[in-house]
Image (cartoon, rainbow, N blue to C red):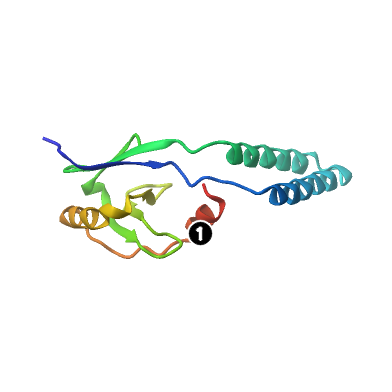
Amino acid sequence: METTILAWEAPQHEPFELGPRSRLIGTLILVAIIGYALITNSPLMAITFILIGVVLFLLQSHEPETVRHALTSHGIYIGRNFYRYDNIHSFHLYDEELYEDILSLHVNGALLSHVHVTIPGDEFVLIRQTLRKYVPEEPHEPSIVDTLEKFLHI
């Protein structure tokens, strides 16, 4: 019988907001790159940067969804995904300034080996005590992808 130990909700990613000056500078750079691509007769490059601009606009104007997470006696629910404890190699709770209140799980995954979840800061100790019963705690050094993810708020 699976019992829920702790459940919480967190945004899917950090909100991505740019000020008006940053938007203007980014737009000018994007227009310059697209213009250069058109002048040098490189339509593929122009299309690529147009798509990058559309994606950045959508990211900036889209509010992150609130996702429900749960720590249970059999594993961890992260949104709609369930990770059984026997499929998790280790965990790490970040408390450094840039990565504070993040749970990192090293899981069996071909494409995604580390899963990060925002956790409620007041439940830090309970999450650590519970996970230590099922999974070893090992430090996970943030990768370049993790740093870019934090920097770009994705």
| Left or right of residue 148, residue 109 in this image | left
- Residue at horizontal 63 percent and vertical 42 percent from the top: 56
Q: Residue at x 69, y 51 (%)?
A: 22
Say left or right for 1 vs 7.
left
Residue 111 locus on image (x, y percent): 43, 47
Q: Nearer the viewer, residue 45 or 69?
A: 69
Q: How many marks?
A: 1
Q: Residue at x 51, y 52 (%)?
A: 149
> Relative to the observer, which residue lies in front, 7 or 71?
7
Disc 1 is placed on an element classified as helix
Image coords of residue 120 (percent x, y): 32, 50
Seen at 53% across and 49% down, the residue is 153
Nearest the viewer among 101 and 83 is 101
Categorize mark 1 by other alpha carbons within 10 Å: few (<14), some (14-19), many (20+). few
Give the residue at mark 1: 147
Q: Which quadrant would residue 96 be assigned to in this image?
A: bottom left
Which image quadrant is residue 151 in? bottom right
Quadrant that contains the N terminus = top left
Residue 79, relative to residue 132: is it above or below?
Answer: above
Q: Residue furthest left?
A: 1
